[in-house]
Amino acid sequence: MNTILIAALVCGVIALVSGLVIGVASKLFAVPSDPRVDLVIGLLPGANCGGCGKAGCADFAKSVVAGENPPNKCPVSSAEQISAIAHALGIEAGSSFKQVAVVLCGGDLNQARQHTLYNGVYDCVSAAMVAGGPKSCSYGCFGMGSCARSCPFGAIEIINNLAVVHPEVCVGCGTCVATCPRHLIKLVPAEAKVHIFCSSPLKGPEKKKVCSVPCLGCRKCVKAGAEGQFTVEGVKVSVNYDTGENGLPGEDVVAAAGCPTGCLMTVAKHLETEYAELAEAKKETENGRK
Amino acid sequence: MAANKPIPPKPLSFPGGIHPAKDGKSLTEKKAVVAAPLFDRYVVQISQNVGAPPKLVVKVGDAVKKGDLLAEASGFVSVPLHAPTSGVISAVGDAPGPMGTLVPAVYLDADGRDEWTANRMAPLDWRTAEPAELKNRVRDAGIVGMGGAAFPTHVKLSPPPDKKIDTVILNGAECEPYLTADHRLMLEQPEKVLVGAAVMARALGVENIFIGVEKNKPDAIDKLNELAGKYGVKVVGLKVQYPQGSEKQLIYALTGRCVPEGGLPMDAGCVVQNVATAAAVCDAVESGVPLIERITTVTGTPLAAPGNFLVRIGTPVIRLVELAGGVTEEPRKLILGGPMMGFAQRSFEVPVAKNSSGVLLLAASEIVQYDSAGCMRCGMCLRGCPMHLSPGPLSMLIENEKFDLAAQNHVMDCLECGACAYACPAHRPLVQHMRRAKAEIRKRAKK
């Protein structure tokens, strides 16, 4: 009994003394911290994606409080979140528009020809170093998912060897843009629903040899759309994302243009309908075989 | 081991390495070099050297003669490019490159006359010429390392003044399976090789010249030995072990010196050149011929008549396949270079470059498709690595993207020789991992 008492007493005294020391030390050596930084950290998404160019959300919060960055530098936060931060700090929010990533290639396994068998490292960056990977098109998506693995939000899905971005999940941090060895991923305004899903600068017939959904450079879309909605560089046509007075091309342009290959399409189509169906059908046949 | 201190007796080999049981050399080693006929079109890639790509000096529609300048050197680490034959420049644009991407190239339509240019360089007497004169000639002839690296030769011949060079080494090892171009060169034109070696030794002001040849080419060793005394060259037979032809391994085998980590052969007092480069140097000096043709082995079991050919730079590979009798069996893989370090190609339209020592076709039956498994820590890769690295553990670090740890474990010293991947019973793509890590580390260092 006595032993237990002594032990309890000793522990109690140690606890008391160290508690006192810690208490005094916390008062004596306190580092003054800006409560506003903690406030901003609380309002930021906390994904630490690095899309703002800072090391993480805490680092970005410090720079916002210090006035180095406006709150809208955070590509992930919605307009409401940004205005909340601006309101809390009593500063201008700055105009912000949401951006999302889009993979400008439509060549999945059914569309783009496979040139070689590839059994190396299953990673786009590695594949790019071996004769440009297995796909015949030297400008297309590898579909090996380096971007999907790098995405901190899980917004990229690989469907039938083609990377597609789910725009409702994507926050536009730009991590995938830096990862893609073919530079196929672009940050575009979230309102842009129509894209030309081809990034190859080759001439039409060359592309036609290797893929069934290339941009042939026929410019039907340029004629169908309003002025300034598309830009033409050599053979390659792309949507002009610097919105002019005519805005971005809508779904009506897709219908009016009648793109001969179908590489001018909506994000929804790129993501789901035909491709997903094909993938589903393929899976079923595979299951059937088993 | 202190650098610059020879350790007798010479090791004549190196620790590590592998020897493929079936080296495929018997397909072509007895075939004498045949000069390829003139084709109607040549595709000359503009950038055929390590360093700055040369600057184009011709335009579409220009008529050029054989040996005329197509592009001029654009810096110190750069060499000019010459027309392989006489004809008209029909286009300047993209052509399939060796890495699967499109590269800028000059399309030359031959006129069939094959006339030499009027501004052909005058022959030099190398025994009396100044070293600087010889170096300039080597540069003006557009000579690069013809073993595969395509490093401008004149740069190797101009070491910084603080580096003391005392040995010139010619690489006649030809350790790559299947390739026999250097073997035939040494056998048929030993004089050219030896003169080239002597020219480079004179340009560097050194007396000590070695030619390292693997012992599986006894006829070439005998042939060189007959003439070597005249030029003060020592011919040394080396153990048959891949990668004996790698600079650092060759220096160790012949001199016992080690090139320090991250260093160049010049840090061990050596300059290493391929025998084909030496022959090109001899041509440039003795007859003023720029580097417009080379000996290339066109081989593989699918070919009807594999052989060694003297081909112009810019010949599309498809022409060489036709020259070698066409295919009797559907080829599944085309490799430019040897099977160990060569690059698989996407297209038969890819042209021969200054560093293309071989064109290899493999049939479907020769290619094994395998799935790589996890590392089983057997250590075969450690035994195979000529650089004393641990490829297996390194590959695991790289798989997990721990590039800084990989750098600490000397991944940058990797030669990419492929000995580890050849030895690996789990078929791990080790070289590809190393290449990715090296590219990634270089990218980060640049930032």
Image (tube, coloured by chain):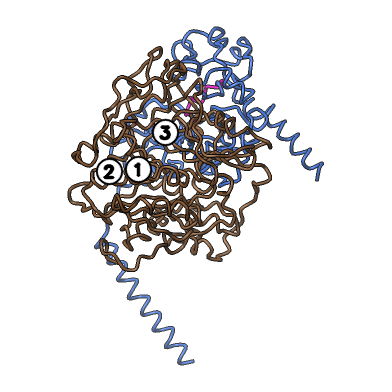
Chain colours: A blue, B brown
Q: Which residues are magenta?
A: A184-195
- Find disc 2 in the rendering and name its residue: B199
x then y, percent, for residue A149: 54, 44
Residue A56 can be seen, yes or no:
no
**Chain assignment, label 2:** B
Residue B404 seen anywhere in this rendered image of the structure: yes
Circle 1 chain = B
Q: Percent x, y for residue A86?
A: 37, 33
Q: Which residue is mark 1?
A: B278
Q: Are marks 2 and 1 in contact (CB under 8 Å)?
A: yes
Vertically, is A132 above or below B119? below
Q: Residue B120 in the image: x percent, y percent?
A: 30, 24
Disc 2 packing (10 Å; few <14; some 14–19; many ≥20): many
Nearest to the observer: residue A137 or residue B116: B116
Q: Looking at the image, is mark 3 or mark 1 nearer the viewer?
A: 1
- Quadrant of the rendering where the C terminus of chain B is positioned: top left
The residue to which callout 3 is attached is: A82
Chain of the residue displaying label 3: A
Say which element carries label 3. Answer: helix
Residue at 43 percent of width and 24 percent of height: B105
Give, as a three-letter code, the residue at label 3.
Ile
The answer to whether residue B263 is above or below residue A224 is below
Occupied quadrant, residue B107: top left
Q: As displayed, is residue A89 above or below residue B253?
A: above
Tell me which amino acid carries mark 2: Val
Q: Find residue B420 and report its horizontal and vertical position in percent.
A: 51, 57
Quarter of the image with the N terminus of chain B in it: bottom left
